[in-house]
Image: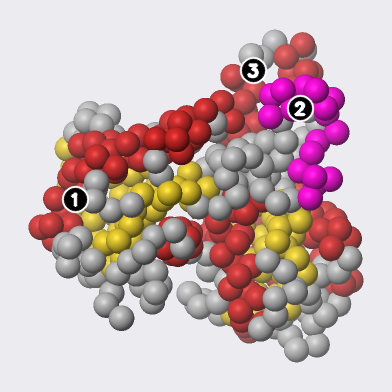
Amino acid sequence: MTTRTVLVINSGSSSIKYQLVDPDSGASLASGLVERIGEPEGAIKHKHGEDVTELTGPVADHGAGLTEVLRLFDEKGPTLTEANIVAVGHRVVQGGKHFSGPALIDDDVVATIERLVPLGPLHNPAHLKGIEVGRKLLSDVPHVAVFDTAFFQDLPEEAARYALNREVADAYEIRRYGAHGTSHQYVSGVVADMLGRNDLKQVVLHLGNGASASAVVGAHAVETSMGLTPLEGLVMGGRTGDIDPAAVFHLTRVAGKSVDEIDHLFNRESGMKGLAGDNDMRAVWARINAGESQAREAMDIYLHRLVKYVGAYTAVMGGLEALTFTAGIGENDANLRAELCERLAYMGMRIDGEANALHSAEARIISTPESTVTVLVVPTNEELAIARQAMTLVQG
Ligand code: ADP
């Protein structure tokens, strides 16, 4: 089969992350990042194999950024023609109730993503910019939107609906949409393949700067920790995760804070950063090792929340067969994995210390053969998942 590739674009408000992926082999042929778009000093980094090109200088807007990226593909390789690009896959965070899978982008899909801006105010406007310039500059290939929320579209209503007044919830589309769905779907699929089972009861812990848990039965998500927005659920780098919403009333009435100030406090100044002084888990461990009691307490709060979620999801599924760690912390933090599994030992979960300590980019089992739950580390690969989802809608 001749090689074919998908250009995956993750467009942020001032950045464009991209990767050229071979959806068949899973290989990444080139990748890069345009940063600080619209600021006086922007930066572009393009990687092709060992060859890394770094440029600095102003990048006026997303159009200028992507034009420069396409020039780098031409100049530094691989040229997109040689690479046989057959589609562009765009990551879109908020698909609301409209998308339960990838969508071939046309003007109607763009209009729907635009209508969903109030539910994804930080992300969707930036994705729309990437889609607009992408369709202009790469007009001879199909563009596909892949939604972070899609995997959670078929959550049972009892999991997706809050016990909020029905009229208000429906009028304002307040429900649990989830996030990180592309990662949860990809990782749970890898686990099913590794264990040769399509009926597994599994929990996936996506622990990065943002963090979420999902409960997956077979190929279907039945619960997830992020809600209307990515604020709900686990303790994160800078986010509170679960908190009594009355804290908002209290901070408004007693501390005189505005809604925007509380939004910033809950989303950016809380979590590990607000508890331990650092949102990077490596720095938190350094503080713990230096004897900082607040850092240790923060780690305990983080672990306690995870124990609650794994326990609750096990109850929801009526059992647990596989527990998988992924993303920056999940893939790299052997200490945290060991401490969590120690707290879950009551389930009969047993970790193989050596396998857990191994540094590897490979998906692997880290539990012992006696463990009642198979524990795994599976590196997530959202770009590959987006490329593969895009291919399901594209002939090429
Ligand atoms: P996101 O995509 O949400 O920004 P990532 O999945 O890239 O996040 O994870 C980033 C986080 O991973 C960092 O903030 C850091 O806490 C954590 N991390 C990365 N490497 C390690 C490591 N070796 N040990 C512990 N934590 C790590």
Front residue (pair 261, 127): 127
| Mark number displayed over residue 70 | 1
In the figure, 40 relative to 2: above or below?
A: above
Query: Residue 240: x and y, percent?
Result: 68, 38
CB within 8 Å, label 3 to label 1:
no
CB within 8 Å, label 3 to label 2:
no
Magenta highlight range = 156-173
Query: Residue 259: x and y, percent?
Result: 64, 17
Instruction: Write the residue at 35% across / 40% down.
Output: 131
Viewer can see residue 51: no
Cα separation between marks 2 and 1: 44 Å
Front residue (pair 94, 311): 94
Name the amino acid type tagged 2: Ala
User: Is residue 316 a member of the stretch shown in magenta?
Assistant: no
Horizontal side of residue 298 vs 86, given as left or right: right
Q: Earlier in the sequence, mark 2 or mark 1?
A: 1
Cα separation between marks 3 and 1: 41 Å
Name the amino acid type tagged 3: Val
Horizontal side of residue 331 vs 214, given as left or right: left
Name the amino acid type tagged 1: Leu
| Mark number displayed over residue 169 | 2
Task: Name the residue beneath numbered marker 3.
Answer: 259
User: Is residue 163 a member of the stretch shown in magenta?
Assistant: yes
The tally of labels here is: 3
Q: Quadrant of residue 275?
A: top right
Q: In front: mark 2 or mark 1?
A: 2
Quarter of the figure with the N terminus: bottom left
